[in-house]
Image (cartoon, rainbow, N blue to C red):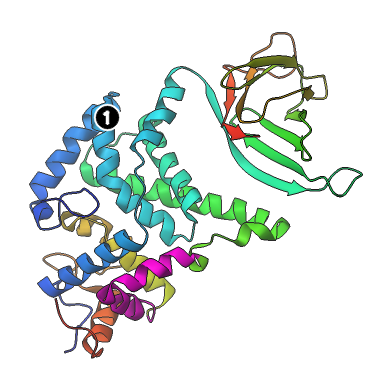
Amino acid sequence: MTGLDGRPSRAEARNSHEWHGRLAGLLVSARAGDREAISELVKALTPLLWNVARAEGLDRDLAEDAVQDAWLSLVRSRDDIRSPQALTRWLMTVTRRAARALNVRHARQRTIDPEMLTGLPSQDPLAEERMVEDERHRRLWWNVERLSPQCRKLLRIIAFVERPDYDLVSRELRMPKGSIGPTRGRCLSKLRRLLASDPGWSSP
Amino acid sequence: MKFNAHDPLDDDDIAVLEELRAMYSKIDPAPDMVARVLFALDLDQIDIEFAAVIEELVGSMGTRSTESTRTITFEGSSLRVTIAVPGGGRSYLDGWIEPPGILRIALVTPDARLETRSDEGGRFAFESIPAGPVHLEIHPTPGNSVHLSHPVVTQQVVL
């Protein structure tokens, strides 16, 4: 079974040895220039990086630029990235940095050219149209919209992190770490409470 | 239900995160980046510097306000190229390079290749350009102030 985005489903990836073992193998081959391995790695981690870039508020074109930057940086970089955990964290950091740089550059252009404003995520009419199709998504979206922007951003990213990697990003994403692993955290608690008090939402 | 922030993640938390992932994947799917990344890496390997479009403006710049000029700026790591294409069906193209210098420049279309040189101020022009997809190549040219270590190839644009 693979998920919607072509990655192994979260349930399948619960075995952290399997997920990390797969990434570790791909990482070694990709850095040696193996195109097959680069493709596999790009397929496996792009959905996460995409959501990191989009959570920074980039439109779709710029988000692609940021994600491409991250992948090219990885292949060109001489940094010593050995573990799969380090890989995920490194890619997330580079994507976020690229996204912020693009944001600054384009914010400057937008002040010159107001036409550039069209196409920002919040004004994408297609997105809203697609939303309505699925009642459950709409309900979930409605509740997510009630969270603070910081919580929306954090949950959007954590939703794309594989479960074995919660630990490694928990500090960065301000999810407090418990004695046996990551805890629910403030933002997920808030969302769970909102969902529980929404009569239109039933537990999965 | 308290849903304490300090409790460990439970199965329902995981289920909510999975639904969030499905929702974002549906409304804002990540594009397939494989072809794009491999293409960029190929350019890397054959030692070409890629200059992507960083800005495109349409505005009337001429004396006659009915004509709108398209201005497209490409940026690579060693130089920036701007081209201006007049509207109104006229088929020439002005351009300039920053930093300025005398460089060999080619305009490449699917069927033709036109060559020229920029002047000391970095300015160049092509007459009678065909409509359709084009890209520019700026080649290392010995004996001037701008040193390129490899050719700069711009993103393809449709004129």
Above or below: residue B12 compared with residue B146: below
The quadrant in which the N terminus of chain B is found is bottom left
What residue sits 85% from the left and 49% below the top?
B66
Q: Residue furthest right?
A: B63
Q: Is residue A195 visible?
A: yes
Report whether A132 appears left or right of A13: right
Task: Identify the main secondary structure in magenta.
Answer: helix
In which chain is the residue bearing label 1?
A
What residue sits 20% from the left and 82% below the top?
B4
Q: Position of residue B154 (x, y in %)?
A: 59, 29
Above or below: residue A145 compared with residue B55: below
Report whether A57 appears left or right of A50: right
Q: Position of residue A186 (x, y in %)?
A: 29, 77
The quadrant in which the C terminus of chain B is found is top right
What residue sits 79% from the left and 40% below the top?
B88
In magenta, the rendered stretch is: A124-146
Q: Position of residue B101 (x, y in %)?
A: 76, 20
Q: Amino acid at mark 1?
A: Ala
Report whether B135 appears left or right of B100: left
Q: Position of residue A11 (x, y in %)?
A: 10, 58
Give the class, few, some or many, for how many residues have Cα within 10 Å of label 1's Cα (few <14, many ≥20): many
Dot 1 lies on which element?
helix
Q: How many marks?
A: 1
What residue sits 24% from the left and 37% below the top?
A40
Question: Which image quadrant is residue B115 in?
Answer: top right
Check residue B4 for magenta coloring.
Answer: no
Q: Is residue A78 visible?
A: no
Q: Which residue is mark 1?
A: A30
Q: Residue furthest top?
A: B142
